[in-house]
Image (cartoon, rainbow, N blue to C red):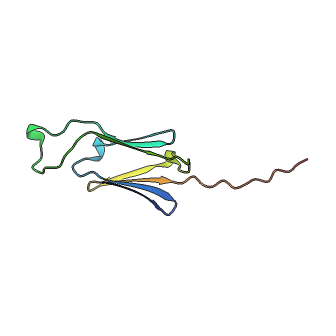
Amino acid sequence: MTDVYHQDENQIIEMALAGFSKEDLEIQVKENKISISYEGEPWRGEDRPTRRIARRSFSKTFVDYNNTLDLSKTQAVFENGLLIVTIPQIEEKQAVQIEIK
């Protein structure tokens, strides 16, 4: 499950990823996109936990169509199966008055 919302001056992406660890996940920023993915094999044999949580490869990409987010300052926290990605908005640039000489 994924939720995307604004909080204060940030864009927040929350992903419920039970059964994963932070070492399993990859977050990549390129141009105006942020991708969250896991590439790996499902559990098999003795590695399989007693719980029946599906663990498959996935990739989700989020696009900043309006170029209003500072993707280079993205922060991520993974705790208790919940990944929280915080992306700050780009500070609004103030207009500059140009003197004509």
Residue at 21 percent of width and 36 percent of height? 41
Give coordinates of residue 74: x percent, y percent. Answer: 46, 49
Side of 34 where 101 appears, left or right: right
Give coordinates of residue 23: x percent, y percent. Answer: 29, 43
Check the image and name the residue furthest to the bottom.
8
Q: Nearer the viewer, residue 64 or 92?
A: 64
Instruction: Locate residue 58: give its quadrant.
Output: top left
Residue at 31 percent of width and 43 percent of height? 25
Give coordinates of residue 14: x percent, y percent. Answer: 36, 55
Side of 91 where 35 appears, left or right: left
Q: Quadrant of the N terminus?
A: bottom left
Q: Nearer the viewer, residue 62 or 99?
A: 62
Check the image and name the residue furthest to the front.
65
The correct choice, above or below, for 56 with respect to 53 in the image is above
The correct choice, above or below, for 75 with respect to 39 in the image is below
* Number of numbered discs: 0
Give coordinates of residue 91: x percent, y percent. Answer: 60, 54
Instruction: Locate residue 89: give its quadrant.
Output: bottom right
